[in-house]
Image (spheres, helix red, strand yellow):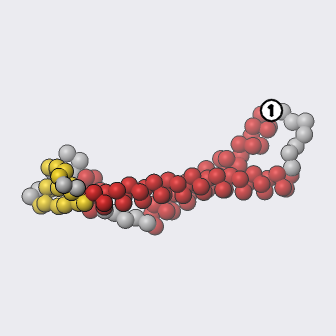
Amino acid sequence: MKWHYTEGKLHVDVDGTKHQFTLEDIIKQSSAYRERRNKTIITFIVSSLLVMGLQLMGAGIPKDQNLYFYIGYFLTPCVLGGIIATIVSIYIRVTKKEGSELDTMFQNNPS
């Protein structure tokens, strides 16, 4: 596989087959990744705050407990938020699988 970049286009030659990709397409794919990452971060924050709110609403803050109890008490919503964000991230990645031709070429021909 050979490739070069000229005049805003990426030219890729794979086994004698020539392909061209515009810079706009490559930027669009990069922004889609950034969008997915931002959705995952927002999901983590919202779900952590939601679980923390439900936890505090239901039980309040316990008194006269060990330090390790409080660490676990306030860390549990973050762990649950992380699990929820991971599941949502995987779901977004699987459902919006826009396999670009450029990505598949580079994955199939790593040289």
How many numbered badges does the structure rendering display? Answer: 1
**SS for callout 1:** helix
Q: Nearer the viewer, residue 108 or 60?
A: 60
Residue 81 in the figure: left or right of residue 94: right
Residue 89 in the figure: left or right of residue 30: right
Residue 72 in the figure: left or right of residue 20: right
Q: Quadrant of residue 108?
A: bottom left
Res. 35 visible in picture: yes
Q: Position of residue 21 (x, y in %)?
A: 23, 60
Q: Residue furthest left?
A: 16
Residue at image mark 1: 67
Q: Nearer the viewer, residue 7 or 21?
A: 7
For mark 1, does the 10 Å Cα neighbourhood hold few (<14), some (14 to 19), or many (20 or more) residues?
A: few
Q: Position of residue 2 (x, y in %)?
A: 14, 49
Q: Position of residue 7 (x, y in %)?
A: 18, 55
Give the residue type at disc 1. Answer: Leu
Res. 104 visible in picture: no
Q: Residue at x 71, y 46 (%)?
A: 76
For the C terminus, the quadrant is: top left
Q: Residue at x 40, y 64 (%)?
A: 97
Q: Position of residue 9 (x, y in %)?
A: 21, 57
Vertical comparison of 21 with 70: above or below? below
Q: Residue furthest right?
A: 64
